[in-house]
Amino acid sequence: MQVDFQSWVAAQQVRFEDVLCGLLPRAEAAPQRLHEAMRYAVLDGGKRVRPLLAFAAGELGGADVARVNVVAAAVELIHAYSLVHDDMPCMDDDVLRRGKPTCHVQYDDATALLVGDSLQALAFQLLAEHRLNDDAQRQLDMIKLLAVACGSRGMAGGQAIDLASVGKPLTLPELEFMHIHKTGALIRAAVLLGAHCGSASPAQLDKLDRFGKLIGLAFQVVDDVLDCEADTATLGKTAGKDADNDKPTYVSLLGIQGARDMAQRLHREALETLAEFGASAQRLRELADFIILRKF
């Protein structure tokens, strides 16, 4: 009998925290301050949406959970590094993340910069030193997939567009292009990497890629709405920061209701891509619901 979604999420979050603890360098290992800061940035925070997507996609493809643990950790390390760098004074200059002081506030700017560098390097070390698929070429493709997702044609490129767009009106296609890269690329990678650990066919991977793209956009639309409506305590980060910084968002372009409507449309389209998978995609459907509702 399959456990309910809330129980599954809670169990995965607890289990994955142990996985991250084991894969990160020990805090007492030299250089101690850097390793302590890396663990500070990664552990005890966040809902782990990207790893959960990887685990759900891995279940769909019958993947060995030990293999999915590695790709989920790699994606989460990339995500954590991006948050550390995004919060720095040269980027968004924020002081709160996941309900605690940001890394550069808790430590210092130089340490935070090195934390991000080190987490990114560790992510690729994990992908290279663990067997993730019996086909060596497919494993190389997985490493490339994550590299593209977090580089100039993915997350970093999206962030560059975001910084260049402050105070400028963007069209909906321009805003979507930015967020397909800034937020969506890593979410798509999480889904695909989890599936690549199993036996998903090329046709199934195409469907899952489409699902990841749609739900990644939906995630950002909901994030923009929450930035306007939720408080800092609920978000775990400074509320209203996008509006204060005059950043283009789905809310500034479409209004609150228009943004909500767009999120619902993306949600419906994402679920439609999973229709052929039947019960094996149940966790992905539930995660899509969570991304729209943003509460358990």
Image: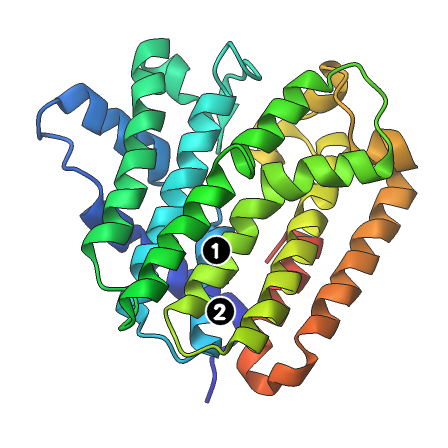
Please give the residue where the numbered disc 1 appears in the rendered image.
190
Between 145 and 190, the residue placed more toward the observer is 145
Report the residue at 31% width, 14% height from top: 107
Report the residue at 48% width, 34% height from top: 98
For this view, does 253 lie left or right of residue 93? right
Q: Where residue 209 appears, x then y in whole percent?
A: 59, 62
> Mark 2 is on which residue type?
Ala
Between 70 and 201, the residue placed more toward the observer is 201
> Mark 1 is on which residue type?
Ala
Above or below, 126 against 287 in this view is above
Between 30 and 181, the residue placed more toward the observer is 181
Above or below, 58 against 148 in this view is below
**Residue 219 bears which disc, if any?**
none
Note whether residue 76 is visible: yes
Above or below, 296 against 8 in this view is above
Please give the residue where the numbered disc 2 appears in the rendered image.
57
Residues under labels 2 and 1: Cα distance? 8 Å
Report the residue at 43% width, 60% height from top: 193
Mark nearer the N terminus (2 vs 1): 2
For this view, does 144 lie left or right of residue 237? left
Helix, strand or loop under label 2: helix
Helix, strand or loop under label 1: helix
For this view, does 217 lie left or right of residue 84? right
Quick check: marks 2 and 1 in contact, CB under 8 Å?
Answer: yes
The part of the image, by quadrant, that contains residue 251 is top right
Check the image and name the residue furthest to the bottom.
Answer: 1
